[in-house]
Image: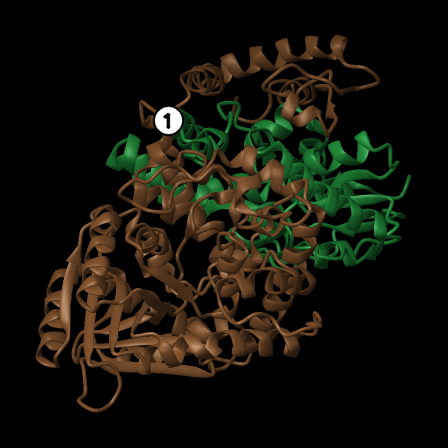
Chain colours: A green, B brown
Amino acid sequence: MRVALFATCLVDAMSPGVGKATVEVLERLGCTVEFPMGQTCCGQMHTNTGYPDQAAPMVAGFQEAFADHEYIVAPSGSCVASVKHQHEWIAAGQLTDRHVTEARRLADRTYELSQFIVDVLGVTDVGAFYPHRVTYHPACHATRMLGVGDRPLQLLRAVRGLELVELPEATSCCGFGGTFSFKNADVSSAMLTDKIHHVLSTAAESCVAVDASCLLHIGGGLSRNRTGVTTVHLAEVLAATEAP
Amino acid sequence: MSTTDQPAGKAEITQWPRATNTGHLHGDYFPRAARVALADPQLRRNIGNATTIIREKRGSVVAELDDWAELRAAGAAIKDATMADLGDHLERLETEVAARGGVVHWAADADEANRIVIEIARRAEARDVVKVKSMATQEIGLNEALAEAGISAWETDLAELIVQLGDDMPSHILVPAIHRNRSEIRDIFRREMGNVGVPAPDGLTDDPPALAEAARIHLRNRFLTTDMAISGANFGVAETGTVMVVESEGNGRMCLTLPRVLVTVMGIEKLIPTWRDLEVYLQLLPRSSTGERMNPYTTMWTGVTQGDGPEEFHLVLLDNGRSTILADPEGRPALRCIRCSACLNVCPVYERTGGHAYGSIYPGPIGAVLSPQLTGVADNPSLPFASTLCGACYEVCPVAIDIPTMLVSLRAKVAADPDSGDARERAVFRSAAWAMSRPQRWTRLLRLMRLGRFLARRGSFRNLPPPFNGWTATRDLPAPPDQSFRDWWTAQRDGGGDA
């Protein structure tokens, strides 16, 4: 199966390891992974900060880069939610009818990684080995806008060696919210404090999520507090195997 | 009053703007007001405890209904259809109320509504009025307007009474005194009740039944001696001109039945066409708001009935910005709101800041979409940004208002508004968009970003200049990697993919 990887700007710029891990898992599951070099960003940061006009060229660019692909997979619930729920609105307000139609067409073809693996590939055991105690933070957009449900947990439970500890108040937002973390830094930090408190209460070695953005935030707090607890993207857990 | 007496009082948290024609819908700059609220551990504990309890109750009673999703869709659809023909339905309501002996008044804004109510009170020679808990009258600042006209308004809802006695403002739609715990309430009762009427019993404790009894004794005389009552409305049924209030305490019913003159201030969006529509809303509202299957008291009245209840009934239909919302297809769903406050109880921002930080008497997620629309975004530019867009509000909304999407649309309106938009921010974002819109530019930017590695200490940034200092005040930011994903891909795959 041919799969186009939408790495997302954040993974491209800050977390290339998540992109590499996504490629590794998909290839292990028999996919032929392509990376359309025309891709940049879904435009969500601009859209959510009040600049859909500035996001419009990114939406058009996304459509150009992925026009010929049947399966578009991204290691992010938030960016996929933007493609599925915001691109049509931006196209309608800022671009042409053709872009609106294209936004709908590509929305149907775009998948968050765990949804793609479980629903399209029909796999829950990806053959991973990750001998660590982890807890899982359900990212808001993946949970509420995409409805990924327990798919990431199904994948994690099948990982050999992995000990999964339930995160208290798991569905409570970590406080990132894109530019919210700057504009409302105090509230954002208060939310993060509670999230970190819950992560630490599990005595997990790492906090897992399906979004590099939430992990950048949670990880930023864990690192500032010198907790020794790390963050790891679901793709990185699934990519890990027993040493040959 | 010292700050220790009143840790969550309005004076410490927000500066209420001077009288405008929209009433209590304006706020301070949210991030600043929130910072003050966050520094109050008692406030956070009170709100955290209360919202957790209501959230759990709501969750369990909503889960009982197999057809909740259908009810929710019906709740949205009925309101949408009503809004599409609101003018016709309002005229029907006016006709039916008048035919049954009521008087209908139309108020374009808060000032006009207040003037109408004051005029009715003067004609009735009322120096005191009792009040049913009502968001509409809080919205228009009616109590303050009445006070200026020499008329005392007495809140009778327990939580509103606490707020009024504490010289405070509501901080929650359903539970206006949610920011107070029971010992604070005991102190307010002991200190204030005697100044305005029957004092608190000697030795009053913070035992909830004792507090309720103190309120009962304090209010009893008011019900029996006051000639005029003012209420809001949960629903107005157009086909019969019937107005309705749902409540928990029965104090509302005392106000609605005992005084000679009854005035109801109703937002025009509270209208529903038929009694049958109540089937949907009377299931959605109590379960979403108090977490009850049915609220204890539901009072409905239709015009006036000789020898039974008020002799005079006035219905003030309040616009105050609602018709502007109605005209905007992206904002219109906010008018579906039935003021249940489920969105407040699940909001991670509200849970930490409480309601006063929002300034407007409509706090939380619904307030963040309602207040800026009612006042215009220029008067409330920070509220649409008071959310992480986590979507918890939309998930619980009984009338399916997609608050996160509306917030995004309102943010665009703020950014485009010449008075509220931040020109510097727009320029920064425009530069970013320029670089991020073309793969060649983006690739070059990523390579440039690598230089940042030399400025990082032990792999991360701990103290960045503005505007990034908001992040690094409490969080580290990892240094950029030495190779972007796309450069890795190109190197590994030798220009693979369909580059």
Q: Quadrant of the C terminus of chain A?
A: top right
Q: Residues within 10 Å of mark 1 (few under 14, many from 20)?
A: some
Measured as percent of width and height from the top left, residue B282 is found at: 38, 78
- Residue at x-position 76% and y-position 55%: A167
- Residue at x-position 71% and y-position 72%: B203
- Residue at x-position 19% and y-position 70%: B314
> Quick one: B107 or B499, which is closer to the camera?
B107
Side (left or right) of B243 relative to B167: left
Camera sees residue A87? no
Q: Quadrant of the N terminus of chain A?
A: top right
> Quick one: B291 or B129, which is closer to the camera?
B129
| Chain ID at mark 1 | B
- Kind of residue at disc 1: Ser
Residue at the extreme bottom of the image, as rendered: B307
Measured as percent of width and height from the top left, residue B79 is found at: 28, 65
Secondary element at tag 1 = loop
- Residue at x-position 55% and y-position 65%: B193
Which residue carries the number 1 mark?
Answer: B420
Measured as percent of width and height from the top left, residue B249 is found at: 48, 78
Image-quadrant location for residue B78? bottom left
In the image, residue A236 sits, relative to residue A116, either above or below, namely above
